Amino acid sequence: TLQYAQCSPSERWCCLARFGAAMVWRMVPWKRLAERHGARILVAGAAGAAGAVGLAVFEPVKAKTPETKQQVFVWGRHSAIPGGSHSDVLWPQRIEWFEQNPKGWKKIAFGPDFGGAIDAQGQLYVWGSVGAHSVGPVRAEIQGAGRGQGLEDLQFSAKKMFALTRRGDALSFDDFLNVLQERVAPKAALRKAQENLQKASEEEKAQFEAALKEAELAAGCDVSDQAPLKLKAKVVSGLPRAGWFAWLQGYRGCVQSMSIGMEHGCFVTHQGQLYCVGGNEYGQCGMAPPKQRGPMGALEERRRVEVDPPVRVEFPRTAAPIKKVEVGGRH
């Protein structure tokens, strides 16, 4: 089972990796083969903190209309599959929901039990699972910071969602999981009431029947499953802000790119500086962690060390400005 796949710009070689083991080979007829079948790979491999979901996106080579109809295939852990799944998806499964958007997709990302996507116009869509219930995919309305700004990038940590706006603001959605739980709460309560009624004795049936009616009423009055999710965003504090000249050009933030891991994240500014925030028990934020008990490398002896607000990583003076950063689980 492949973890991710990426092709070179020349479309002549491909790299596939499975849990850190990479395989590379040359694909001489790759471009001709794709054109013969009328499609080319647009994106292969999805950014995700958990790495438990695979992704492949296809689009036509020659479009007869301005609309772009992409095909998205997903596989992996069932809880992060868009639209939900009763079991893990072992083979690539086509998610037709993505084809309903004629604008096309800019970014698709996954977390352990949730995911999201940004279309070509910067609109955010999210989905996820809470217990046995799934939410979405559904459009998200950003509240607070970043409202009205188009999004350029989307990534997930183990519990949070991060986005990068076109104006250079790095946003965090700390209550993302709580919003998902609130959306499925009426359905979860209804299912619990049904289970309680089935297990109830004759003396308890009247009580549980009344509870079931209340749960059915609450579920019936709940908002539609396709109603937009209102997600409150805030700017990641501690990152440098744009100066007056950048403000005149429409840029508020100073972040050019970012990379989010399970418990820490890194941000590259337009000036080529690198800032890191989050877990630092292994020095993954570029700072020396406190001394730990036990031998170095003993995972069970490592206690949580948090870096907040973000800190600037110092490089040798001879180092050139940073262009891009990629994080791993503890790197």
Image: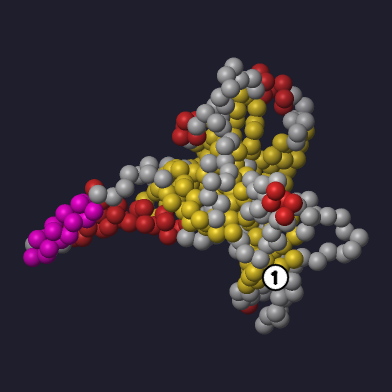
Which quadrant, please, contains the C terminus?
bottom right
Query: Label 1 belongs to which residue?
Result: 282
Q: Which residues are magenta?
A: 203-218
Is residue 180 or residue 13 the one in the foreground?
180
Q: Secondary structure at mark 1?
A: loop
The picture quadrant where one finds residue 214 is bottom left
Could you tell me which residue is drawn at 72 percent across and 40 percent down? 15
Instruction: Kindly tell me whether residue 88 is visible in this rendering.
Output: no
Query: In screen coordinates, is 164 left or right of 177?
Result: right
Could you tell me which residue is drawn at 62 percent across and 55 percent down? 170
Q: At which x and y percent is residue 103?
A: 55, 31
Is residue 222 or residue 13 the one in the foreground?
222
Q: Is residue 254 magenta?
A: no
Is residue 34 or residue 68 the one in the foreground?
68
The type of colouring in the image is secondary structure
Query: In screen coordinates, is 210 left or right of 39?
Result: left
Q: Is residue 216 magenta?
A: yes
Q: Callout 1: few (<14), some (14-19), or many (20+) C-alpha neighbours within 10 Å?
A: many
Could you tell me which residue is drawn at 47 percent across and 60 percent down? 175
Q: At which x and y percent is residue 62?
A: 64, 20
Query: In screen coordinates, is 202 left or right of 97?
Result: left
Could you tell me which residue is drawn at 30 percent across and 52 percent down? 187
Picture layout, residue 138 above or below residue 308 = above
